[in-house]
């Protein structure tokens, strides 16, 4: 473009600006928390009455003058104070355990302030928002070493803290001492517990902050209510004088009004035209502040999540179900755990410093921790745990056992019990695929033969008793494997366990029988059929406990006995076995009580049907109960003690199966051995043979399995159990067909005894 002979370039194109190159130091903090703090004075509270020292004074007045506020504070602090506080090591390693022990003593034993007092004062951070402690160090000689420890963790009350800074605005506090002087304490000397710290607000937040409005209003309501009582609670006495009254009349009236009192002989005589009375102050027309005060009390408690304290209190809005109370209290206790965590974090910073002063190259530090604020629902937890373990979702472990023992305050497990293993779970209702096929039943099996077995057992039940003769006398020569077994000790222990079990269960059941018969007698004479039906022996839990203890003792002895024979360490009690014992003990207790009461009531009814009197029928019921108790306890002692000794032995054999050549059945502990047991005596089976899982075959059976180890000089062949013998046993105690004569090989250990019986029977068929 040309203008006045000059060329002008009016293009709008401009040079692109060059963006400045910015470099940021990643480790440099650019912003700040945004907390309004100037020279250590924090200004975050919008209400000037609650700011700084003024707020401390208000909160102090609230906690000391109001019952509801006091209850709220106690509700939030007492569970934390009642919890178990301890030092948890960083790991189970010996160095970490040593450090934890040192800190435990430094915190709970060596420093001047008791932990209970120290914790109580640390929790002043709840009403005041913060609490400060000064660490005062000293040296201490322990075990030939010099340690730096706390001589005192000294409280510095919130009222005395002037500002959160020292010289040159360095971190720390400036404190007013009791003598009026100020001191500066650097932050590295302090342990500061702050409630709900936001940003750099070291003043924290009082748990009473949200309750202040309700406390303030309620406080004024109390004043108004007091004024109302003063002004309207009592009527004002008045006197109405006649028209022509004199000053003397007026003076007398004033004297009467001033001296009006309530007593048993008070009265007034009114002259003509006089009137004396009380003015109605209309007090009933004023609003009752009680409902408003109750509302604000609930709001104060709600500020700390303790509103459940008001449930059921009778005030309006204070009703609620147990479930609601449980929900509220659960949330409340969880909030207390958060508070306790905050206290622990504050002290753990001091613990780290203490450890670094006394130990070198520490990677992980012990921590202050606690237990016991929230309640664990043991029933729900155990149910969930049982479901998880039985479904195979988790496998029980030693840590699980330790947790449950601690949760239930049970004694610790014997430290010598190591090597815990879990047995393979089997379903007894399903056939064992490894076992040889069995026929459905043998021809001729019927109830008569079973009855024959029971009769034979009763006839030949004169076993040696530990109280009479504890000398072991086998009917045959011991095999090489049996030579390692202390049969005499085993016999004594079986006798002892059976006698103790029998005595304890009999004593318990006969005592319960007395109470049962009293209830039955009362119901029978009253003709109360429902009460007769409901009458029972109310000792199920105690009976189950005795049964469980007996089985566990027998099982533990069996383990130790077999482990000693094999020269190995006895394993811990597997969880599956313990659960089995627990379930079986409950089942046996239920069954025995039901059978005792069933026999007793049947005898009662049968006696009445014969036309006897109620008294005679009750005597029959009592006799039946006694007989049932004696029979059941004797059978249970014989079956359970011997059975669980064998269970314990089998656990050891299962755990050491690779070292075992086979298992030999030994039936030499009884004075009289039945034909079936004689048929299996001395036979050897493989460790995985399902028949080896059978502990005993009938009541009063004392047979055991004996391990033949692979490294023994004599390794006899494994012949197993012949089908003809195996099929006679129904896989349950007393569920067998007793053979007419022993089925024994000619070279078997029991051959001579079997032949002797056969010859004796041939000579006298009536035997």
Image: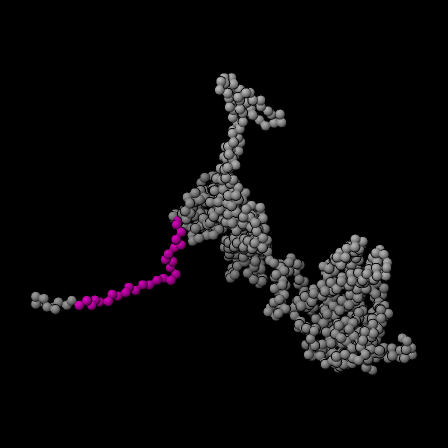
Left or right, 137 with reference to 470: left
Q: Is residue 67 above or below residue 261?
A: below
Which span of residues is magenta-colored? Answer: 11-37
Left or right, 205 with reference to 21: right
Whole-percent x and y of residue 721?
76, 79
Could you tell me what secondary structure mostly forms the magenta stretch? loop
Q: Is residue 717 above or below residue 235?
A: below
Q: Residue drawn 47% across and 52% down? A: 196
Whole-percent x and y of residue 83?
58, 53
Of 132 and 693, which appears nearest the observer? 693
Of 174 and 429, which appears nearest the observer? 429
- Residue 695 visible in the snapshot: yes
Whole-percent x and y of residue 504?
78, 59
Q: Quadrant of residue 48?
A: top left
Of all residues, the one furthest to the right in this rendering is: 763
Whole-percent x and y of residue 550?
74, 63
Q: Quadrant of residue 733?
A: bottom right
Of 620 and 711, which appears nearest the observer? 620
């Amino acid at each position: 473009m040309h203008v006045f002979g000059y060329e002008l370039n009016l293009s709008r194109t401009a040079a692109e600006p060059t963006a400045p190159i910015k470099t940021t130091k990643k480790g440099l903090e650019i912003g700040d928390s945004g907390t309004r703090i100037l020279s250590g004075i924090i200004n975050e509270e919008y209400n000037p009455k609650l700011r700084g020292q003024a707020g401390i004074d208000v909160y102090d007045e609230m906690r000391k003058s109001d019952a509801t506020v006091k209850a709220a504070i106690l509700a939030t602090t007492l569970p934390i104070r009642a919890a178990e506080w301890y030092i948890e090591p960083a790991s189970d390693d010996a160095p970490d355990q040593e450090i934890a022990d040192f800190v435990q003593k430094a915190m709970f034993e060596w420093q001047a302030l008791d932990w209970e007092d120290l914790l109580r004062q640390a929790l002043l951070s709840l009403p005041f928002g913060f609490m400060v402690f000064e660490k005062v160090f000293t040296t201490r000689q322990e075990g030939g070493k010099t340690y730096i420890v706390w001589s005192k963790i000294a409280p510095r009350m919130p009222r005395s803290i002037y500002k959160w800074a020292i010289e040159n605005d360095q971190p720390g506090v400036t404190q007013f001492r009791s003598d009026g002087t100020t001191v500066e304490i650097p932050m590295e000397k302090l342990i500061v517990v702050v409630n709900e710290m936001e940003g750099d607000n070291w003043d924290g937040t009082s748990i009473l902050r949200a309750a202040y409005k309700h406390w303030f209003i309620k406080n004024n309501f109390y004043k108004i209510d007091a004024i109302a009582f003063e002004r309207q609670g009592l009527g004002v006495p008045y006197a109405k004088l006649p028209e022509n009254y004199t000053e003397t009349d007026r003076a007398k009236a004033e004297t009467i009004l001033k001296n009006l009192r309530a007593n048993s002989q008070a009265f007034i005589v009114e002259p003509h035209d006089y009137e004396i009375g009380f003015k109605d102050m209309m007090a009933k027309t004023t609003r009752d502040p009680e409902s408003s005060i109750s509302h604000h009390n609930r709001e104060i408690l709600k500020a700390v999540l303790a509103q459940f304290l008001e449930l059921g209190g009778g005030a309006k809005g204070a009703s609620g179900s147990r479930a609601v109370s449980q929900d509220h209290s659960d949330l409340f206790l969880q909030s207390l755990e958060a508070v306790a965590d905050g206290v622990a974090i504050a002290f753990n910073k001091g613990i780290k410093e203490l450890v670094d002063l006394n130990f070198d190259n520490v990677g992980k530090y012990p921590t202050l921790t606690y237990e016991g604020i929230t309640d664990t629902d043991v029933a729900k937890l155990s149910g969930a745990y049982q479901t998880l373990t039985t479904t195979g979702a988790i496998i029980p472990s030693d840590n699980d056992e330790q947790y449950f023992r601690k949760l239930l305050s049970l004694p610790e497990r014997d430290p010598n019990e190591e090597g815990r293993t879990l047995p393979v779970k089997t379903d007894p209702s399903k056939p064992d695929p490894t076992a040889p096929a069995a026929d459905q039943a043998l021809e001729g099996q019927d109830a008569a033969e079973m009855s024959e077995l029971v009769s034979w057992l009763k006839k030949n039940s004169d076993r040696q008793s530990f109280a009479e003769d504890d000398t072991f006398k086998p009917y045959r020569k011991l095999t090489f494997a049996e030579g390692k077994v202390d049969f005499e000790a085993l016999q004594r222990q079986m006798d002892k366990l059976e006698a103790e079990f029998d005595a304890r269960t009999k004593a318990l059941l006969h005592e319960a029988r007395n109470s049962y018969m009293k209830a039955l007698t009362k119901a029978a004479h009253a003709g109360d059929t429902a009460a007769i039906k409901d009458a029972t022996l109310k000792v199920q839990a105690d009976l189950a406990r005795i049964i469980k203890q007996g089985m566990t003792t027998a099982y533990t002895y069996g383990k130790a006995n077999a482990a000693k024979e094999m020269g190995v360490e006895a394993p811990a009690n597997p969880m599956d076995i313990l659960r089995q014992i627990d379930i079986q003990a409950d089942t046996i207790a239920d069954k025995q009580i039901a059978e005792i009461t069933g026999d007793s009531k049947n005898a009662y009814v049968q006696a009445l049907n014969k036309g006897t009197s109620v008294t005679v029928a009750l005597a029959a019921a009592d006799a039946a109960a006694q007989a049932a108790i004696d029979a059941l306890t004797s059978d249970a002692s014989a079956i359970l003690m011997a059975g669980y000794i064998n269970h314990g032995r089998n656990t050891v054999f299962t755990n050491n199966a690779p070292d075992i050549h086979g298992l030999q059945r030994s039936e030499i502990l009884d004075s009289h051995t039945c034909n079936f047991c004689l048929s299996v005596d001395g036979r050897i089976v493989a460790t995985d043979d399902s028949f080896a899982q059978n502990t005993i075959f009938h009541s009063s059976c004392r047979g055991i399995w004996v391990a033949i180890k692979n490294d023994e000089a004599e390794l006899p062949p494994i012949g197993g159990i012949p089908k003809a013998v195996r099929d006679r046993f129904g896989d349950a105690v007393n569920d067998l067909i007793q053979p007419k004569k022993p089925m024994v090989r000619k070279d078997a250990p029991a051959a001579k005894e079997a032949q002797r019986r056969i010859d004796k029977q041939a000579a006298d068929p009536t035997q």
